[in-house]
Amino acid sequence: MLLKRLYEDGLAQASYLLGCEQTGRAIVIDPNRDVGRYIDAADEEGVDITDVTETHIHADFVSGARELARRTGAHLMLSGDGGPEWQYRFAAAEGAKLLHHGDRFDVGTLRFDVRHTPGHTPEHQCFLVTDTTMNDRPVGMLTGDFLFVGDVGRPDLLERAAHVEGTMISMARDLFRSLRGLGDLPDYLQIWPGHGAGSACGKALGMLPSTTLGFERVANWAFQIDNEDQFVRGVLAGQPEPPTYFARMKTVNRAGPEPWPEMDSLPEIHVPGVRRALSTGVAVIDVRPSVEFAAGHIPGTLSIPMGDSFATWAGTLVDDQRDILLLADDARRLRGAQRLLALIGLDRVAGWSGETARHTWEVEVGPLERVQQVAPQGVAGQQRTVIDVRRATEWDEGHVPGARHIYLGDLVEETRDLPRNLPIALHCQGATRASIAASLLQKEGFTNVANVVGGYRAWTEAGLPVERDSQASS
């Protein structure tokens, strides 16, 4: 049996290529939109992709299942569980086979048994894998967003992200029952999950790429709670704020995602074009590191530093109906940003600008804008309003005394009534989210914005006082 994990760092997302070495047949499970990657991987391994499926309708990236099946001529298989509201709208047109709990299919000598595991989503399925050339017992299970290393899939996304009211508690109960339904499976069973640490599809995902069911039974918090009501409270507590684009992804992937866009070389946009873009509502995104953005940027631009959280914040803050202009000094960073945008369905990248545009702006238009930097020890002395833009769970674990908590995704709305000349010091855990926050406030007309150098991490490392549960401590 061939097993190849293809991991997308920018989404903390795992796809899997499983192949039968005797027949040369292979299946891809949970492909994202960059389907060329899977075709190349199959070619490298000397197998043909004959089947494609996915564990559920994804919320955090555009699915590539339909396009991969089209390009390879593979059989497309999709979940038929979960009820009428959670059926794939394009399944019939694509000739997809609908899978149900208890179904079985073969890919060469590999046998796959389908298990309906609702909880993260109503239609979610897992796939037990048996290599029949070795044994008649399953060797592993592809668990998608149901069971992770150290965690389970969150059951609140339909309500909190897709706004399907009244589903959180019922989905949490389904998740509890799905987990208890694993009781007939052996401890040695390998677990191959759909996400790793950094994904917003859970709250405490581990770093390891795989695990075993036996280890999760003794180490994963979700298996330690036998009372259903207690489990419901535990799984809903402390979940991170869901990125706002998740609702759009569910709709796109249920209706039928578009194929991967052409990644032709982008035209360079000069200063007149940048000014026009800023005045017409184009999303002008500066993807440089936060320290470079702070040192000088074109006024009105949005800082989203290229990195592992780029897709999350671009999806949260950028309207998919607007054109996008990328500002980058590095070709690799530019290509990476364009690719990550496409993975979440933001295809309208119209061009790019770089260092030349900033220099020209200073000469022909006016000074670049800068973000002041203030050391943690200097925050109190400058008498600034400190705004903490981290997640609620991070805030609860400890925060700067007297700070105001406004989650980054709510920052613009929550600061509408503040005076534009108010001295503000922003911080997150490190630097990225504070840089985004500063750009948002400057874009909204705030004139006295600073970032706390090193964020909350630097604050605590300096031994400065922190507050927890409204009680100050050091």
Image (cartoon, rainbow, N blue to C red):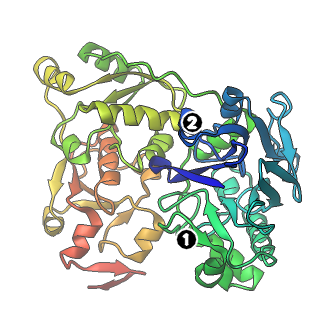
- Which residue in the rendered view is the most extreme toward the top? 272
Q: Which residue is mark 2?
A: 43
In terms of depth relative to the viewer, which is nearer, 95 or 303? 95
Query: Image height check: is 20 above or below 278?
Result: below
Q: Which residue is rendered at x = 46% and y = 38% of the image?
A: 340
3D distance between C-alphas at marks 2 and 1: 43 Å
- Label 2: element kind: helix
Residue type at mark 1?
Gly
Query: Where does residue 261 sit, x and y in percent of width and height?
Result: 54, 24
Residue 468 bears which disc, if any?
none
Mark 1 = which residue? 238
Would you say 272 lies left or right of 15 here?
left
The N terminus - image quarter: bottom right
**Residue at the image point whose x is 61% and y is 50% from the top:** 16
Q: Is residue 413 visible?
A: no
Please tell me which residue is depicted at 26% across the width and 85% down the height of the picture. 474
Residue 249 visible in the picture: yes
Q: Earlier in the sequence, mark 2 or mark 1?
A: 2
Q: Is residue 380 left or right of residue 420?
A: left
* Residue type at tag 2: Asp
Residue 225: x and y, percent? 69, 84
Q: Which callout, 2 or 1, points to the residue nearer the camera? A: 2
Q: Secondary structure at mark 1?
A: loop
When the figure is inspected, residue 170 is found, relative to residue 312, above or below; the finding is: below
